[in-house]
Amino acid sequence: MSKTESVTKLKTIEPKIGFQFSANGKDYIIEDKLSIARSMLSSEFEINLFDSSTNSIKKTLISAYNDLNGTNKDRSVKFADAAIKIHNLVNKIQNNLSFKDLPILRYCALYINHKDEDRRTITDEQINTKIEDWQEEGIEISGFFLLVLSVLPSVKKDFVKYMEAFSKNQVQEKK
């Protein structure tokens, strides 16, 4: 690399309510309130976020294995059931490998808005545009993961407890 070439560094968002940043020429802000329409979508995204865990994948594969071997609760071989479970799992993994369909980013798009955006509704096109803006700006993914952990109602309490314990340990280590 010559001296005239520059390295493009990734940018990071701070996972906190009120944080403002620019992406692809648009000013964004992280907010904590959702309309009814966005709340309904957030529930759908939460299922996608947590239903793709390693534990969930393992359970699905074990269930399909049991269907194939007749070791399920019915004690019968169920080829079609096993095939459907594996097919659905493959599709879910395939969707999560697509950057635009990454549930974390789609979920964050509900909470991250630009100033002129109507907060009452949101479309797939709007969500995709936001994700494209963030990608074009070079925003790295970890801030989005942390944002989900900090705003998701079902994990917010556990995340706050973890951060408090982590901070307490850091202070004790410095003493």
Image (spheres, grey):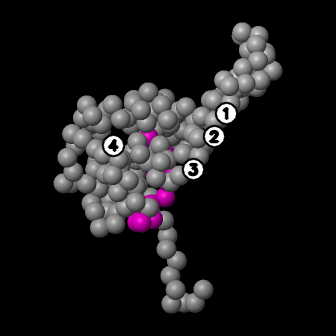
**What residue do we see at 33% from left, 52% from top?**
125
Which-is-in-front pick, marks 2 and 3? 2
Q: Which tag, 4 or 2, sits closer to the chain's start?
A: 2
Q: Which residue is mark 1?
A: 86
Name the spot of residue 170 as percent of width and height, x first: 56, 43
* Label 3 element class: helix
Q: Residue at x 21, y 39 (%)?
A: 120
Amino acid type at mark 1: Ile
Answer left or right for 27 relative to 81: left
Which residue is denoted by mark 4 in the rendering?
A: 110
Residue 174 is tagged as none
| Mark 4 to mark 2 CA distance (whole Å) | 26 Å
Residues at marks 1 and 2 touching, judged by CB atoms closer than 8 Å: yes
Q: Nearer the viewer, residue 39 or 149?
A: 39
| Quarter-of-image position of residue 60 | top right
The kind of residue tagged 2 is Val
Where is residue 1, by image quadrant?
bottom right
Mark 2 is surrounded, within 10 Å at the Cα level, by few (under 14), some (14 to 19) or many (20 or more) other residues, namely few
Distance CA(mark 1)–CA(mark 2): 6 Å
Residue at image mark 3: 97
Nearest the eye: 3 or 133: 133
Disc on the earlier residue, 3 or 4: 3
| Residue to which mark 2 is pinned | 90
Left/right of residue 119 with respect to residue 138 in the rendered view: left
Query: Residue 158 in the image: x percent, y percent?
Result: 49, 29
What secondary structure is found at the residue carrying circle 2? helix
Q: Is 146 contained in the magenta span?
A: yes
State which region is magenta: 136-148
